[in-house]
């Protein structure tokens, strides 16, 4: 699954690697469980939802 990200100040969605997704989540939530949060994001966006974590939104490519 390809995950796209968009910060609230951006207009374009960008495909993002899993390593970068973990960095983004860590920046947004601090030391809370970034891997667990990423797993939650992946599960939530499967059906076309858009999930926000801090200032960043996540969605599955093709939505």
Image (tube, rainbow, N blue to C red):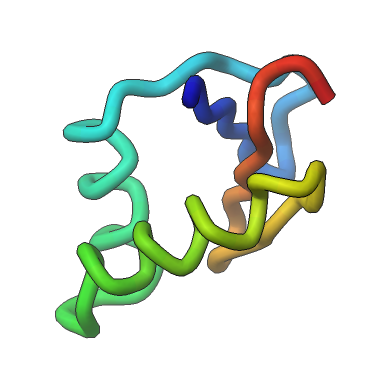
x 71%, y 27%: residue: 10
Q: Is residue 43 above or below residue 62?
A: below
Image quadrant containing the C terminus = top right
Q: Is residue 6 above or below residue 22?
A: above
Q: Residue 53 is drawn in which quadrant? A: bottom right
| Figure label count | 0
- The image quadrant that residue 19 belongs to is top left
Residue 52, percent across and down? 66, 61
- Report the front residue among 8 and 22: 22
Side (left or right) of 42 relative to 8: left
Query: Farthest residue in the bottom direction?
Result: 32
- Residue at x 58%, y 50% (from the top left corner): 56
Q: Position of residue 17 (x, y in %)?
A: 30, 22
Position of 46 relative to 54 (above/below) = above
On the image, which quarter does residue 44 sit in? bottom right
Q: Is residue 14 above or below residue 19?
A: above
Q: Which residue is pictured at 35% across the width and 74% down the height? A: 29
> Residue 13 location in percent, x, y?
68, 20
Residue 13 appears left or right of 56: right
- Foreground pick, 26 / 36: 36
8 left or right, relative to 54:
right
């Amino acid at each position: 699954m390809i995950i796209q990200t968009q910060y609230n100040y951006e207009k374009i969605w960008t495909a993002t690697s899993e390593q970068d997704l973990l960095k983004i989540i860590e920046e947004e939530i601090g030391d809370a469980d970034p891997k667990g949060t990423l797993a939650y994001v992946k599960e939530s966006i499967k059906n076309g939802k858009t999930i926000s974590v801090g200032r960043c939104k996540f969605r599955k490519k093709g939505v």
